[in-house]
Every structure is written in C-alpha cells, then in structure tokens.
Image (cartoon, rainbow, N blue to C red):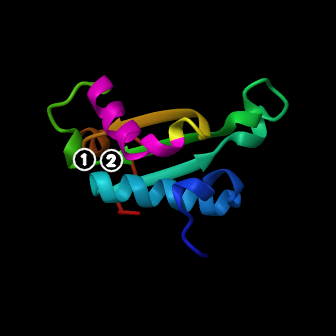
C-alpha cells in the first residue's frame, strides 16, 4: 500500500486512510497500542457524510500520563490537524495511559 499525503486523504481508499491515521498518531505519540476503526459506512447518507469519514481511535500511550482527557484528545487532534477539516468529519477518541489500560478488565495483555 502506498502512503498517501494529507492532500490525497479524501481520494484515498479506506485502507489508505486508516494507514494514514495510524502513521500520524504513531509518529506523534509513539503508542504501545493503537487501533483505528472506520465507522463511515454506519453514517452513509447523513448530512456530514460527504465532508469526510467517521473514525474511532483507541490509543494507549505514555504521552498521556498526567494529562486530562481534553489534553489527551488535543494531542490526537494535533497529530491529524491537516485532515480534520478536509477528510475527517467525526473522530471518537479513547485515550489511555499504559497503566489505565492494564487495569481495564478486558484489556489484552499483548501489544498490537
């Protein structure tokens, strides 16, 4: 799969968009876990659907230590700033420190 630029994001394939989001968040936060899900199909036909995709990201990173939820979300938004206005219509963020994630009852023990 060829890497896409921010300018190509809107015309990229769904897999390329996910790879772009993963690469940007990965470079900015060096997460121990990162999952990106494209929820766009669930929102097809609603007013904002043409403006970009809907995504859910789960990020586990030491960079979130000592930060409030809003500050964690800002870090993720900053990593994706150039595509938030032209390619991502909605972004659901679940941001955890490694310690918080480890305490979750259904947290997988292996890294992904």
**Looking at this view, is 73 or 6 the one in front?**
6
In this rendering, the answer to whether 22 lies above or below 55 is: below
Q: Position of residue 85 (x, y in %)?
A: 55, 35
Mark 2, residues whose alpha carbon is within 10 Å: few (<14), some, or many (≥20)?
A: many
Residue at point 39% right, 52% down? Answer: 25
**Looking at this view, is 44 or 8 the one in front?**
8
Residues in magenta?
70-83
Mark 1, residues whose alpha carbon is within 10 Å: few (<14), some, or many (≥20)?
A: some
Q: Position of residue 95 (x, y in %)?
A: 36, 37
Could you say whether the residue bearing mark 1 is in a helix, strand or loop?
A: helix
Residue at point 85% right, 31% down? Answer: 45
12 displayed left or right of 3: right
Residue at point 70% right, 61% down? Answer: 13
- Dominant SS in magenta: helix
Q: Position of residue 24 (x, y in %)?
A: 41, 55
Observer able to see residue 63: yes
62 displayed left or right of 45: left
Numbered mark located on residue 25 in the image: none
Instruction: Report which residue position mark 2 lands on.
Output: 60
Q: Position of residue 88 (x, y in %)?
A: 59, 39
Q: Residue furthest right?
A: 45
Q: CA distance from mark 2 to mark 1?
A: 6 Å
Observer able to see residue 32: no
Looking at the rendered image, the quarter that the C terminus falls into is bottom left
Looking at the rendered image, the quarter that the N terminus falls into is bottom right
Dot placed on the residue nearer the N-terminal end, 2 or 1: 2
Could you say whether the residue bearing mark 2 is in a helix, strand or loop?
A: strand
Q: Residue furthest left?
A: 66
Res 89 quadrant in image: top right
The reply to whether the C-beta atoms of the residues labelled 2 and 1 are less than 8 Å apart is yes
Instruction: Report which residue position mark 1 lands on.
Output: 98
């Amino acid at each position: 799969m060829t890497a896409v630029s921010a300018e190509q994001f809107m015309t990229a394939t769904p897999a390329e968009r996910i790879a772009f989001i993963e690469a940007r968040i990965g470079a900015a936060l060096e997460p121990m876990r990162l999952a990106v899900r494209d929820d766009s199909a669930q929102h097809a036909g609603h007013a904002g659907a043409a403006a970009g995709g809907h995504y859910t990201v789960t990020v586990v990173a030491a960079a979130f230590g000592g930060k409030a939820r809003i500050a964690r979300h800002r870090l993720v938004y900053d990593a994706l700033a150039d595509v938030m206005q032209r390619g991502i219509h909605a972004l659901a963020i679940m941001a955890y420190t490694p310690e918080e994630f480890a305490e979750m009852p259904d947290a997988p023990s292996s890294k992904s």
